[in-house]
Image: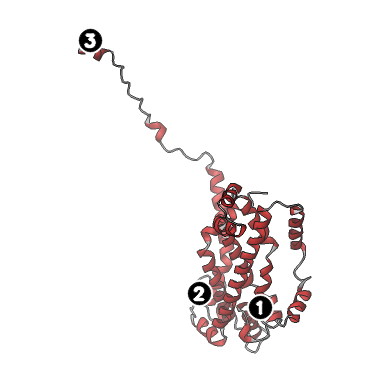
Amino acid sequence: MSASTATATLPEVVAPPLVPRRHLRWRPDRKPIEKAIFIVLLIGATVLFLYPFVWIVSASFKPRAQVFDNRLIPLNWAPGNYVQIWHAAPVLHWAINSIYIAVLAAGTVTISSALVAFGFAYFRFPGRNVFFGCVLATMMLPSAVTLVPVYLIWDHLGLATTQFPLWMQNLTGSAFYIFLQRQFFLGIPRDLFEASRMDGDNYWTMFWRIAVPLAKPALIVTFIFEFQASWTNLLQPLIYLRSESQWTLSVGLYQLLNIFGPDGPSPGQWQLIIAGLVISTIPMIIVFFLGQRYFVEGIATQGGKG
């Protein structure tokens, strides 16, 4: 066969058709009006939620006569309010007590609730749903109903005038956090646990090596929720804490209201009370921004399983 004949038998290569440039042009949104309304409502809600905090921060930098003038930018700045409230009360000591109690309360309830939630999510035993329903039923019981019996228990143990009742009761877990974490544990493939069991792991190592790392967003959400609840808790510290050296920041702010409020010995010092309120808010803002990524992920993924 000649070279010309071999060349003639080769298939003809056809170039792919060119994509018209008109298909690559940007297309406007099909529903611009709905999108614009949604953005306007979102901005309005953001301003609505941020306005009180901005007002409080602004008022904390105002002199006494201008606290309630509703200016978001102070006409006369008075940063000395923070120095004055810092010297008028042991704010730093109260903040340390609050951080100490809040970290212990959040840490204990996170671990204890995770252990119970893992048990309800992994193990299959008769009456599991009944027991889980009983746990959820405790959420229907107001905390004020158990306030006196719980206090009598701590008083019998000799701990009623200490800081231990503010965080040690979380060692038994919380029904709300057990429910949240159980839903997250149910979303973990069971095959991972079965493979771990075949490798010789026991239930404890399965919990720490598989469940806890995969459920990190849920655990961080629980920690943030309980930290915020303990940080802003006022009723229980008022009941159990008798000494000023044991006070948390919430109790300290309540006492500042009694001193600088309208009926106190130094009435009308609202700028000092608001400055103390801003100081108490700063740690919660820091905690939220540190765990924001896990917070959003945990909220988005919890509740996916029934």
Secondary structure type for disc 2: loop
Q: Which of marks 2 and 1 is nearer the N terminus?
A: 2
Label 3 to label 2, Cα distance in Å? 97 Å
- Residue placed furthest toward the bottom: 265
Q: Name the residue under label 2.
A: 74
Q: Is residue 113 above or below residue 199?
A: below
Image depth: mark 3 or mark 2 in front: 3
The colour mode here is secondary structure
- Looking at the rendered structure, the kind of residue marked 2 is Pro
Location of residue 86 in the rendering, given as x and y in whole percent from the top left corner: 53, 84
**In the image, what residue occupies the spot 65% across and 73% down?**
167
The answer to which of 128 and 73 lies nearer the viewer is: 128
Secondary structure type for disc 1: loop
**In the image, what residue occupies the spot 51% across and 58% down?**
293
* Disc number for residue 280: none
Asked if the residues shown at circle 2 and circle 1 are in contact, with their CB atoms under 8 angstroms apart, the answer is: no
Q: In this view, does 220 lie above or below 12?
A: below
Left/right placement of residue 14 relative to residue 214 reads left
Q: Quadrant of residue 44?
A: bottom right
- Looking at the rendered structure, the kind of residue marked 1 is Phe
Q: Mark 3 points at which residue?
A: 1
Q: Say whether residue 127 is visible.
A: yes
Q: In this view, does 68 lie above or below 111?
A: below
Location of residue 159 in the rendering, given as x and y in whole percent from the top left corner: 70, 81
Q: Mark 1 points at which residue?
A: 164
The answer to which of 110 and 94 lies nearer the viewer is: 110
Location of residue 52 in the rendering, given as x and y in whole percent from the top left corner: 58, 68
Crowding near the residue tagged with mark 2, few <14, some 14–19, many ≥20 C-alpha atoms within 10 Å: some
Left/right placement of residue 207 relative to residue 158 reads left
